[in-house]
Image (spheres, helix red, strand yellow):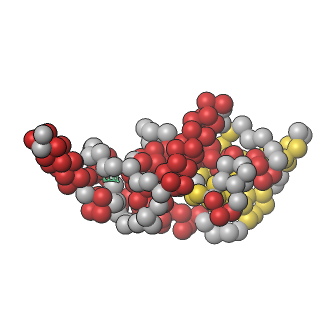
Amino acid sequence: MYTEDDFIMISALQHYIFCPRQCGLIHVDDVWQDNLFTVRGEILHEKVDTDTYETRGDVKTVRGLRIHSYKYGLVGRCDVVEFKNTLNGKEVFPVEFKAGQPKEDMSDKVQLCAQVLCLEEMLNTHISKAAFFYGKIRRRNIVIIDEELRKQTITVIQSVREIVDNKKIPKAEYSAKCGNCSLINICQPKAMNKRRLQNYIKELYSV
Ligand code: SF4
């Protein structure tokens, strides 16, 4: 069990999947820089994260619910959680809002699954599905929270822990995704690669 001092933000998991170095820069070095993608996401979340709730029929909708897990050492916030009364008890259904469209990598699904792990611990329940609402296509996509996704999420949590607990920021690896990274000017991945190459050549001829 972790204490609140050890909690890591759920967003760190997405940052790790995008790039382990980005995760280290943000969650160890406290570096942040906005770009078009981060601003778009923030605008959408400002509209959703209002700390309110409403009840329609048998569904209570809570917005901006703060969540945590002592088991996994996580803290974060759900955009929307729907609580529905069913014959089998209360059904808990988180919905995460995204500005764009479904991503090819697992980062969004891992974020959603981490929210589920927190809600299950807090509410002592089991959640089998959740959803994304994508702003661009204006549609809900259901995600099944199966064993495979749970395992992947726990593996990512452990990898993030290694970076954050050891305060060790991974080295830059320049790739196509650097062009979409808000930290490119701080990270300078091309310069890092060049420096590494220079060191390698220096080592090669120093014998
Ligand atoms: S610029 Fe590239 S290597 Fe650096 S943090 Fe961003 S994605 Fe990672």
Q: Is residue 63 above or below residue 133?
A: below
Q: Residue 166's spot in the image, x, y percent?
A: 50, 54
Left or right placement of residue 162 versus residue 192 in this view: right
Decide which of 141, 162 is in the foreground and name it. Answer: 162
Q: Residue 156's spot in the image, x, y percent?
A: 54, 42
Left or right placement of residue 45 versus residue 105 in this view: right
Q: Is residue 180 in sight in this rendering?
A: yes
Query: In the rendered picture of this protein, how many numbered marks are placed on residues?
Result: 0
Q: Is residue 13 in sight in this rendering?
A: no
What residue sits 61% from the left and 66% below the top?
A: 49
Q: Residue 48's spot in the image, x, y percent?
A: 59, 64
Residue 2 figure quarter? bottom right
Q: Quadrant of the C terminus?
A: top left
Left or right placement of residue 147 versus residue 205 in this view: right
Q: Residue 32's spot in the image, x, y percent?
A: 40, 66
What residue sits 37% from the left and 66% below the top?
A: 33
Left or right placement of residue 21 versus residue 135 in this view: left
In the displayed image of the protein, which residue is found farthest to the front?
207
In the displayed image of the protein, which residue is found farthest to the left?
205
What residue sits 47% from the left and 61% below the top?
A: 28
What residue sits 81% from the left and 44% below the top?
A: 125
Decide which of 145, 27 is in the foreground and name it. Answer: 27
